[in-house]
Image: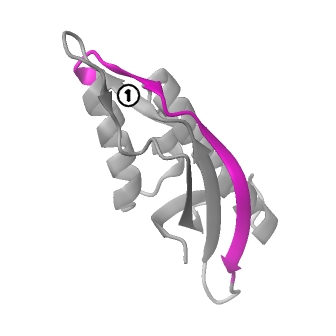
């Protein structure tokens, strides 16, 4: 993933969702933080939700993510950012908090597509934004 080309960007976008999956499974956001740009608000939303639940002594039951499709939408030699539509399948999830009943989590959808913006920054790929795929 230390290559600066379109195929590597596509592979990196898939890796990002594997990092999110790992973070949900382990309640450790280290991997998301390592591959997210500090200005990626959506990335920060992922880490905040996971970190807040972990601090409360909770965890997720379910919510596992599998990447089922990738499609490069825009790659330009004039821009460091590559736009990639990523389709994932995610099992339903519940947040488990000590002393409370399990509560369904909004990210537990069965199938969703996101537009992931990745950029080559400081000799590595970073996710800079996540939006809705068109």
Q: Which residue is mark 1?
A: 94
Please give the name of the residue rendered at 50% of the width and 34% of the height, measured from the top-left corner: 63
Let me know if residue 47 appears in the view.
Answer: yes
Q: Nearer the viewer, residue 25 or 77?
A: 25
Residue lying farthest to the top in this orientation: 99
Q: Nearer the viewer, residue 31 or 105?
A: 105
Q: How was this image coloured? A: one colour
Q: Is residue 5 visible?
A: no
Q: In the visual, does 87 lie left or right of 27?
A: right
Is residue 73 part of the magenta span, yes or no? yes
As displayed, is residue 97 above or below residue 66? above
Residue 97 part of the magenta segment: no
x and y, in percent, of residue 38 in the image: 38, 56
How many residues crowd mark 1 within 10 Å: few (<14), some (14–19), many (20+)?
some
Q: Give the residue displayed 41% in from the left and 52% down from the top.
A: 43
The quarter of the displayed image where residue 49 is located:
top left
Majority SS type along the magenta span: strand
Task: Judge whether 51 appears above or below 97 on screen.
Answer: below
Query: Where does residue 75 sit, x and y in percent of width and height?
Result: 69, 81
Image point (41%, 45%), residue name = 107
**In the image, residue 104 above or below residue 125:** above
Residue 134 pos. (x, y %): 55, 78
Per the rendered image, the range of residues in magenta is 55-75
The one of 98 and 82 positioned closer to us in this rendering: 98
From the viewer's side, name the closer residue of 93 and 83: 93
Residue furthest out toward the left: 99
């Amino acid at each position: 993933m230390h290559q600066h080309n379109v195929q590597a960007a596509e592979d990196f976008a898939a890796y990002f969702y594997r990092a999110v999956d790992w973070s949900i499974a382990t309640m450790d956001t280290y991997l998301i933080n390592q591959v997210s740009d500090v200005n990626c608000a959506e990335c920060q939303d992922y880490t905040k939700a996971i970190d807040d639940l972990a601090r409360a002594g909770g965890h997720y039951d379910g919510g596992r993510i599998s990447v089922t499709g990738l499609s490069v939408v825009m790659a330009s030699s004039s821009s460091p950012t590559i736009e990639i539509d990523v389709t994932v399948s995610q099992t339903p999830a519940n947040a488990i908090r000590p002393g409370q009943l399990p509560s369904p989590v909004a990210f537990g959808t069965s199938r969703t597509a996101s537009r992931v913006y990745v950029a080559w920054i400081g000799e590595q790929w970073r996710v800079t934004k996540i939006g809705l795929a068109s």
